[in-house]
Image (cartoon, helix red, strand yellow):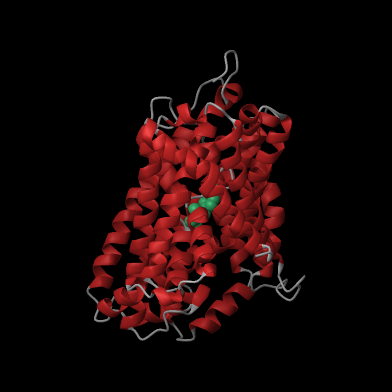
Amino acid sequence: MAKGKKSLEQQNSGKTEQFSSTGFILAAIGSSVGLGNMWKFPYVTGQNGGGAFFLLFVLCLIIVGLPVLLGELAIGRAGRGDAYTSFKKLGGSKWWGWLGFIGILAAFLIMTFYSTIAGWTLHYAVQSLSGNLFSNGDYAGQFTAFTASTSPIIWQIVVMVMTGFVIARGISSGIEKFNKIVIPGLLVILLIMLARTLTLDGAAEGVRYFLYPDFSQITFESALLALGLAFFSLSLGMGAMLTYGAYVDKNQSLPAATLAVGAGDLIYALIAGLIIFPTTFTFGIEPGSGPGLVFVALPAAFESMPYGNLFGGLFFILLAIAAVTSCLALTEVPVAYMMRRFKMSRSKATIWIMIAMYAIALPCTLSAGGVLSGYTWGGRTFFDWMDYITQNIMLPLVGLLVTILVGYVWKGSGEETGLSPTWMKWWRFSMRVVAPILILFIFLSSIGLV
Ligand code: PFF
């Protein structure tokens, strides 16, 4: 931290707030493990060559994901501020600050539609535990009726209030404490579910579908998909890891934290697939049914399973927990900015951000199956646009900026990472050459130029 300058937390509350070492790792795993791993990863893998896609995903994590994650953590820890402040400080100009601001905007906008789906998972958890979910077998119809009703609005508010409450309590008594309780809890529920699903009749077939490598399905597009998913699932390109990095102690090893987060992300994604596919195969459900897999196909599978409402309930609670820990990271990004920019207290900044977010989050929910779904621009609803702009444009753009900042502009980046000389060479090579080129490819392809 620069001499005479106070950290973000000191400035606002008069005391330094930091993550403890394990608290930080759990919070970062909490941010990375989310709907990306549990909801998107399994069906995308199933549809794109199973094990071959999984290998590609791991490769993307190692070659691009982990180096960029390390870069973001280093920027955050050295910059000691929100994404705007750290970019400005290390890039040496206000322009860099505004480039970092794109990350803040991305996190803010992602939260608006992410909280919609997080709300759905809470509704499904309650419906499953109460048994209502299984009262009629038409799961596609139930899903349509639910998204068209006013319930998603309420559930989204529940998610946002929960998130705001934890954020307002601060780094160590809010975000760290919450993640310390729920992340190990999540693993326990996952393992219980795993034990159940791997003993089902169709387990072998499901595991084969999920992990048997079919390289004939690997195309340029699936490679880009794997890279985009690796980025999203590690929470990169939106200032999240960077913001968390600002609360990390100087003694913490950033490479070790990077590996722990990468491993956590991968393990949770793998287990999610090992729960979903054995279940769908055992109960004769079409596994490649896309985004509707967890809300439409899985309930049908849980219905046929003994104690299905309990296992279904556990599964959706799992999704909801994973989603909320990600919402915390997404919300902390703009809250940290507001605290510094407007010298606000944490609670005040949280309230303002929540109100502003909700103004966009509501139309997101209403356009995902609700009254606004009929309004489209260029074939996309409001919800689809938020999803498209953030994931296809802002995320790769900020990712690219991170690689340029740490690879070319900020000279002290290598020392901040604490890597050994040999690893440092590899890391620099990834930051300067491999990662920017690959990210540029995702970017150009997602806007239709490649
Ligand atoms: N990594 C989360 C997921 O896989 O669902 C998504 C996410 C969370 C992205 C938090 C960004 C973030 F700040």
Residue 10 picture location, percent across and down: 56, 22
Q: Residue at x 71, y 69 (%)?
A: 381
Query: Is residue 288 visible to us here?
Result: yes
Q: Residue furthest top?
A: 4
**Residue nearest the observer in this picture, 328 or 40:** 40
Question: How many labels were placed on the picture?
Answer: 0
In the image, residue 256 above or below residue 395: above
In the image, residue 371 above or below residue 175: below
For the N terminus, give its image quadrant.
top right
For the C terminus, give its image quadrant.
bottom right
Q: Residue at x 44, y 46 (%)?
A: 66
In the image, residue 54 above or below residue 308: above
**Relative to residue 288, is residue 275 drawn left or right?**
left
Residue 191 picture location, percent across and down: 27, 60
**Relative to residue 164, is residue 40 drawn left or right?**
left
**Relative to residue 98, is residue 62 drawn left or right?**
left
Please tell me in which quadrant of the rendered image residue 374 appears.
bottom right
Residue 130 picture location, percent across and down: 41, 71
Q: Residue at x 58, y 30 (%)?
A: 410
**Residue nearest the observer in this picture, 403 or 308:** 403
In the image, residue 394 above or below residue 18: below
**Residue nearest the observer in this picture, 15 or 262:** 262
Residue 413 picture location, percent across and down: 51, 30
